């Protein structure tokens, strides 16, 4: 049975799942959920997902929400040939978890805060405090990358896929300072991957345009 993916190209969390499906060459049926139009608050959606978030998958009746949980599930179930994306070794896997939880908490939180301020509260861009938090995220990722080419070790894992979906969106609002050399190199490297170009770039371009025009409008108000 084909997996149903409830998502939207502009969602960073959704784009992480799109990128993974590109790497795994996984077929799915996309059901577009437009959160700005309130599709995620409809009773039939809330019945499946009380968190009212995208992405969500439905795999032969099994429902799973949260991009981080979905990434681990999809690699475990469909990624036998790309098992290094979610290492079996306990310590390597634990580092992947730590990076995923950092992404799910700190990185997601600052991105959502900035987005809500711009989209709903007429901010013309991130304020000083928010920029400091973004800079802290960039510093921390730069440290994670100081010894290895990828955020959780010397190979690409789902932690990179998850982080780059958020970081590419943040970098558009608050560019990565070249002083973050390792982070800049990692970001540039991933941007050249086919799975990034297909899974992340179209939605990233769309949300960037939306954010830029909102920031422009808000700065004139
Ligand atoms: N931790 C969640 C975050 C998902 C999330 O916040 N998605 C946003 C779109 S990027 C959303 O659905 N927002 C609508 C809402 O929360 O009502 C994940 O990784 O899936």
Image (cartoon, rainbow, N blue to C red):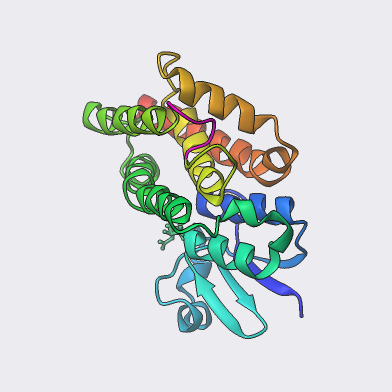
Q: Quadrant of residue 24?
A: bottom right
* Residue 3 located left or right of residue 40: right
Nearer-the-camera pick, 126 or 1: 1
Return the x and y of residue 157 as percentages of the image width and height.
57, 47
Is 50 drawn above or below residue 107 in the view shown? below
- Extreme residue toward the top, this view: 179
Q: Nearer the viewer, residue 119 or 221?
A: 119
Picture residue at 75% right of the left edge, 38% below the top: 194
| Residue 129 position in % (x across, y down) | 21, 31
Number of marks = 0
Quadrant where ligand 1 appears: bottom left
1 above or below 7? below
Identify which residue is drawn at 33% across, 48% down: 109
Can the viewer see residue 55? no
Q: Quadrant of the C terminus?
A: top left
Relative to the observer, which residue lies in front, 136 or 181? 181
Q: Examine the rendered structure and indicate whether residue 122 appears above or below residue 41.
A: above
In the orientation shown, which residue stands out farthest toward the left?
Answer: 129
Q: Is residue 196 magenta?
A: no
Q: Position of residue 112 (x, y in %)?
A: 37, 47
Q: Is residue 187 left or right of residue 183?
A: right
Name the main secondary structure of what is drawn in magenta: loop
Name the foreground residue: 49 vs 197. Answer: 197
The residue positioned 43% from the left and 70% from the top of the image is 52
Which quarter of the figure is the N terminus placed in?
bottom right
- Residue 112 appears in view: yes
Which residue does the image show at 50% across and 31% down from the upper left?
Answer: 148
- Residue 151 percent coordinates (x, y): 48, 38
- Please state the extent of the stretch shown in magenta in the rendering: 146-151
Residue 150 included in the magenta stretch of the image: yes
């Amino acid at each position: 049975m084909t997996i149903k993916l409830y998502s939207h190209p502009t969602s960073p969390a959704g784009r992480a799942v799109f990128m993974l499906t590109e790497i795994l060459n996984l077929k799915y049926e996309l059901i577009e959920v437009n959160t700005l139009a309130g599709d995620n608050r409809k009773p039939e959606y809330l019945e499946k997902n009380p968190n009212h978030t995208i992405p969500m998958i439905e795999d032969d009746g099994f429902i799973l929400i949260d991009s981080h949980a979905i990434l681990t599930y999809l690699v475990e179930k469909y990624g036998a040939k790309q098992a290094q994306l979610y290492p079996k070794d306990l310590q390597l896997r634990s580092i992947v978890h730590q990076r995923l939880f950092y992404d799910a908490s700190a990185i997601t939180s600052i991105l959502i805060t900035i987005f809500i301020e711009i989209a709903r509260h007429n901010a013309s861009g991130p304020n000083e405090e928010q920029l400091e938090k973004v800079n802290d995220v960039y510093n921390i990722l730069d440290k994670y990358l100081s010894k290895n080419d990828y955020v959780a070790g010397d190979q690409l894992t789902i932690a990179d896929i998850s982080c780059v979906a958020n970081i590419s969106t943040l970098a558009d609002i608050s560019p990565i300072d070249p002083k973050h050399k390792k982070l800049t190199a990692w970001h540039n490297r991933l941007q050249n991957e086919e799975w990034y170009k297909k899974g992340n770039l179209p939605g990233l371009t769309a949300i960037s345009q939306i954010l830029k025009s909102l920031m422009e409008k808000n700065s004139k108000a």
